[in-house]
């Protein structure tokens, strides 16, 4: 009899969080948390069982944002500060402003314009295992799209997802408000895809809501993601226990079945800020997308793994088949180069290739989710079982009319649904399968979170009536809810000892076309970024500072240059006035609302000048240098992300007979 325990926790991002705290602690003020959320050991569990609002009505009839009061846009959804249920890992983010995704990106769509694999952007949260798992799930469109109840953008900002908790189908709702930094300008956790897709931060939020808050989803294993979205049994395998031949065979077979896979690098003291073999991040999880066997000109096979980093970058990868390697140009079988055989795309997109030797050197473990596209979930939802224990079983039955391959599991709430300090041990379970005569077919003993299951796929159960006996040895404080789960090619009715079924929730697969039936309510006007088209009439400076500062700004006479995609704007215009003095206009600014911008304008000229600065003359200093008898006028344009306008203009008139020198410098931070 086999006893199995959980292993291979990938605590990816833990050190990143620590580093982010030190970087951002001075930027983000601590704010008191909302008192709306009751904080207890069963908060997340109670939330998962609560009745849903009428989300179809909300999506179709709301012209403005719907707010999810069960998971509010405040610090209580980041971590439970001030309670025994937190380790304060995300204190630097508690005071974040939250912003609606529809405000951050009004023209975004759920899936964006490109393939799903390029939509994941990991932020400051250490949940690479989750994002790598999502990326692996999304490799097959039909598998991935089942998750989304209402994939159309709606004005309520309400999105529903088909998920599995305790292996049981249910719908999870979130609104589209996400933590967006000190100024509410940019996602700090999972970000918007480069193709303007928003499903990444929404699914991350659904996972955080399921598990109480964002802090509770730091560190984990990809198999958790496989179970949450696809309800599939998973294996966690230590690579050191497999020969290279056995590893290649297992992965090749899994890939041919479209199973879901992820690889994890070894843990490290500083988490994923440390670098492991081939410049891969330590304590980090990567999606294993596929295998790519290459054939040399003499038809020798080279076995490659196609892998993806959820950080969406691979420029530092130093393996033998990195982008730009001459190996890709090697002629192989049929005259095709290795790059042509693999369908290589050279881009810093997070996708890279490794030989089997490199994989065994760099990675510690592999997660495999046994996905079968034609399998469905059958279940019995048992709540608050006060009878079954290690000596007295809960009894369930099901009948088959023909030989049927299947998986059988008993699933409880995952440990992360309990806050810190609530559950520090694992229950011990025994599950017995008997045929109609009472003969034992299979028995498994296992610790609760080891993900052990009965696999009857290769040896299908014959037709007949079967009995499942479940013996739980619960631990103190545990909620005694569980699901009796069967995954098979057809729905199977599971009954209890009284002959009753129990299916208290289900997925929604009929709302794909759900859309608003009303127009979107007008949004408050957004502050405008600088207009640098300069389409106004030509204008010559006159020395009338009030007139000059108003008329030169948009004039085509003041050409404004754009550097670093709008991060730094600058322009200058000078005019000889009356033949004996100069008028000067200097413009600085930024098109970015994500950084704190600082521009410094300096003019050196003789005393007797006059000037006007749009940010206020009090933002300028005038210092006289006695040796040259010149003034240095220095004006500072400081623009924070939430400060508008994001520009400053200095106009100056020199003293009669005086020239000038000027300069400008710029910086951005945040």
Image (tube, helix red, strand yellow):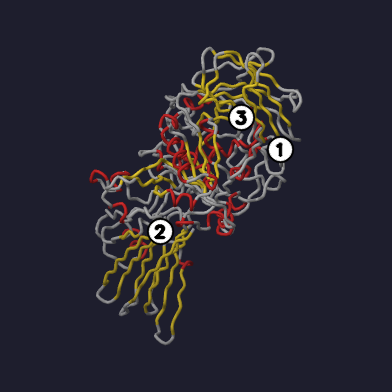
At a point 55% along the width and 40% down the height, the residue shown is 236
Eye-nearest disc, 1 or 2: 1
Q: Name the spot of residue 557 as percent of width and height, x first.
A: 26, 61
Q: Name the spot of residue 451 as percent of width and height, x first.
A: 60, 35
Measured in 3D between alpha carbons, the distance from the residue under mark 3 to the one under mark 1, in whole angstroms, is 20 Å
Q: Name the spot of residue 355 as percent of width and height, x first.
A: 41, 49
At a point 57% along the width and 41% down the height, the residue shown is 73
Comparing 127 with 220, the one in front is 220
> What numbered label is drawn on residue 647?
2
First of labels 3, 2 by sequence position:
3
Dividing the image into 4 quarters, which one contains the N terminus? top right
Vertical comparison of 497 with 159: above or below: above
Which element is circle 1 on?
A: loop
Q: Are marks 1 and 2 in contact (CB under 8 Å)?
A: no
Vertical comparison of 471 with 73: above or below: above
Eye-nearest disc, 3 or 1: 3
Which element is circle 2 on?
A: strand
Q: Is residue 538 visible?
A: yes
> What numbered label is drawn on residue 40?
1
Measured in 3D between alpha carbons, the distance from the residue under mark 3 to the one under mark 2, in whole angstroms, is 55 Å
Neighbours of disc 1 within 10 Å: few (<14), some (14-19), many (20+): some
Residue picked out by circle 3: 166
First of labels 3, 1 by sequence position:
1
Comparing 654 with 299, the one in front is 299
First of labels 1, 2 by sequence position:
1
Please identify the quarter of the rendering in which residue 169 is found: top right
């Amino acid at each position: 009899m086999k006893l199995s325990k959980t292993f291979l926790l990938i605590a990816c991002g833990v050190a990143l969080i620590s580093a982010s705290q030190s970087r951002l602690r001075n930027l983000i003020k601590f704010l008191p948390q909302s008192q709306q959320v009751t904080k207890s050991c069963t908060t997340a569990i109670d939330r998962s069982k609560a009745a849903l609002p009428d989300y179809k009505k909300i999506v179709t009839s709301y012209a403005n944002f719907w707010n999810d009061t069960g998971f509010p846009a405040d610090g209580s959804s980041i971590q439970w500060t001030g309670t025994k249920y937190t380790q304060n890992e995300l204190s630097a983010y508690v005071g974040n402003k939250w912003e609606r995704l529809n405000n951050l990106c009004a023209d975004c769509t759920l899936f964006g314009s490109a393939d799903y694999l390029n939509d994941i952007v990991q932020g400051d949260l250490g949940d690479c295992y989750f994002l790598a798992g999502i990326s692996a799930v999304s490799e097959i469109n039909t598998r991935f799209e089942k998750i989304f109840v209402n994939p159309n953008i709606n004005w309520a900002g309400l999105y529903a997802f088909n998920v599995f908790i305790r292996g049981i189908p249910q719908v999870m709702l979130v609104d589209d408000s996400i933590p967006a930094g000190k100024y509410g300008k940019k996602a700090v956790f999972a970000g918007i895809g480069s193709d303007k897709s928003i499903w990444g931060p929404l699914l991350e939020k659904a996972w955080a809501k399921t598990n109480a808050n964002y802090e509770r989803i730091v560190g984990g294993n990809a198999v958790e993601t496989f179970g949450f979205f696809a309800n599939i049994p998973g294996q966690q395998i230590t690579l050191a226990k497999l020969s290279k031949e056995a590893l290649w065979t297992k992965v090749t077979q899994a890939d041919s079945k479209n199973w879901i896979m992820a690889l994890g690098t070894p843990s490290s003291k500083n988490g994923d800020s440390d670098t492991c073999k081939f410049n891969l991040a330590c304590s980090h999880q990567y999606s294993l997308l596929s295998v790519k066997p290459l054939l040399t000109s003499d038809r020798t096979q080279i076995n490659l793994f196609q892998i993806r980093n959820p950080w969406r970058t691979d420029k530092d990868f130093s393996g033998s088949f990195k982008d730009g390697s001459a190996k890709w140009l090697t002629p192989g079988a049929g005259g095709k180069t290795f790059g042509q055989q693999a369908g290589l795309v050279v881009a810093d997109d997070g996708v890279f290739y490794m030989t089997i030797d490199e994989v065994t050197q760099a990675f510690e473990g592999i997660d495999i989710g046994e996905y079968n596209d034609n399998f469905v979930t059958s279940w019995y939802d048992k709540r608050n079982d006060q009878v079954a224990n290690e000596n007295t079983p809960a009894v369930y039955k099901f009948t088959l009319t023909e030989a049927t391959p299947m998986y059988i599991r008993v699933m409880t709430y995952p440990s992360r649904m309990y806050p810190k300090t609530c559950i520090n041990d694992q229950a011990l379970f025994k599950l017995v399968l008997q045929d109609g005569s009472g003969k034992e077919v299979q028995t498994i003993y296992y610790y609760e979170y080891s993900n052990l299951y009965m696999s009857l796929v290769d040896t299908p159960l014959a037709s007949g009536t079967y009995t499942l006996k479940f013996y739980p040895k619960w631990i103190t404080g545990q909620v005694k809810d569980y699901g009796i789960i069967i995954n098979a090619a057809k729905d199977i009715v599971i009954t209890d000892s009284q002959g009753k079924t129990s299916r208290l929730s289900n997925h929604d697969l009929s709302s794909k076309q759900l859309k608003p039936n009303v127009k979107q309510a007008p949004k408050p006007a957004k502050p405008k970024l600088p207009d640098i088209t300069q389409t106004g009439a030509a204008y010559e400076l006159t020395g009338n500072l009030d007139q000059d500062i108003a008329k030169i700004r948009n004039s085509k006479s003041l050409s404004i240059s754009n550097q670093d995609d709008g991060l730094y704007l600058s322009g200058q215009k000078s005019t000889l006035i009356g033949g004996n003095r100069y008028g000067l206009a200097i413009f600085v600014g930024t098109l970015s609302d994500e950084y704190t911008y600082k521009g410094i304008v300096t003019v050196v000229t003789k005393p007797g000048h006059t000037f006007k600065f749009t940010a206020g003359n009090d933002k300028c200093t005038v210092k006289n240098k006695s040796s040259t008898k010149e003034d240095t006028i220095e004006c500072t344009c400081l623009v924070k992300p939430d400060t508008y306008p994001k520009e400053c203009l200095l106009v100056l008139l020199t003293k009669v007979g005086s020239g000038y020198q000027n300069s400008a410098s710029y910086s951005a931070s945040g």
